[in-house]
Amino acid sequence: MRRRVFDVLTSAVGLAMVVVLLVAGSLLMWGSSFASSQVHNQLAQQQIYFPPAAAFRHAKPGTEITPSMIPSVSQYAGQQLLTGQQAEVYANDFIAVHLSEMPYHGVYAKISAAAMAQPKNAELQALRLTSFEGTTLRGLLLEAYAFSIFGEIAFWASVAAFALAAVMAVLVGLGFWHAGRVPLDKEILVDSNSERQVHTMA
C-alpha cells in the first residue's frame, strides 16, 4: 500500500474518532448539567435548612444535635440544603441518627409490625408515622445524592472525552501533514528480495 494512502486513511479514521469523542463529550456534559440542575431545583423546593451554628454549641445525646453530628453536619450550619453532598450528610448524619434513637432503632418495618399488633396504642401509631416520614425523607435525599454522583461522573467523563478529542485532533493533523510530504510512489513495506533483484539487474 502506498504510504500516502495509508496516512490519509488512518487520519480519516482518527478524524471520525474526534467527531465521536466531541459528540460523546457534549452529551456527557449535558447530562452532568441536567443532573446537577435537577438535584439543586428539587432540593431547593423542599426548603430544608441545617440547624444554626448556635445549636452545635450545646450538642448532647438524645437532643436535636448530638456530638456525632458535629464533625459532618456542623460544616453546613444554617445553610439551605441544595447539593447532593449536603443531602447525603443530612440523610446519614442527621436523620439516620434521630431514627436510630427511636424505639426499634427507627426501623419502619419493625415499628409498623408492632403498631399493627397493637392498633389501639396511640404512641405506636404516632411512632410509625414519624418513622415513615423520616425514612421516606432520608431515602429521597439519598436518591438526590446518588443523582449528583452520576452528574459528577458524567462531568469528568466529558472532560476526558474532550481531552482525548484534542489529542486525537493533533495526531490527525500530523497525519495529514505527513501524508502531504510523503512521495507519491513510496510504499509502506517493500519486499527485501524484490529490492535485491532490482539492484542485481541494475
Image: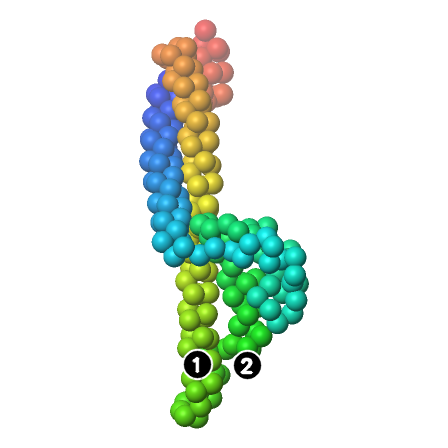
**Tag 1: amino acid:** Ala
Residue 174 versus residue 160 in the image, above or below:
above
Task: Tell me if 43 is positioned left or right of 97 in this view.
Answer: left
Residue at 45 percent across and 70 percent down: it is 135
Q: Is residue 180 visible?
A: yes
Q: Please tell me which of labels 2 and 1 falls first in the chain.
A: 2
Label 1, on which residue? 126
**Residue 93 spot, x, y in % from top left:** 57, 62
Name the residue nearer the viewer: 190 or 182: 182
Quote the CA–CA distance across marks 2 and 1: 12 Å
SS for callout 1 = helix
Name the residue nearer the viewer: 56 or 15: 56
Within the image, what quadrant is residue 137 found in?
bottom left
Figure quadrant of the N terminus: top left
SS for callout 2 = helix
Residue at 54 percent across and 68 percent down: it is 96
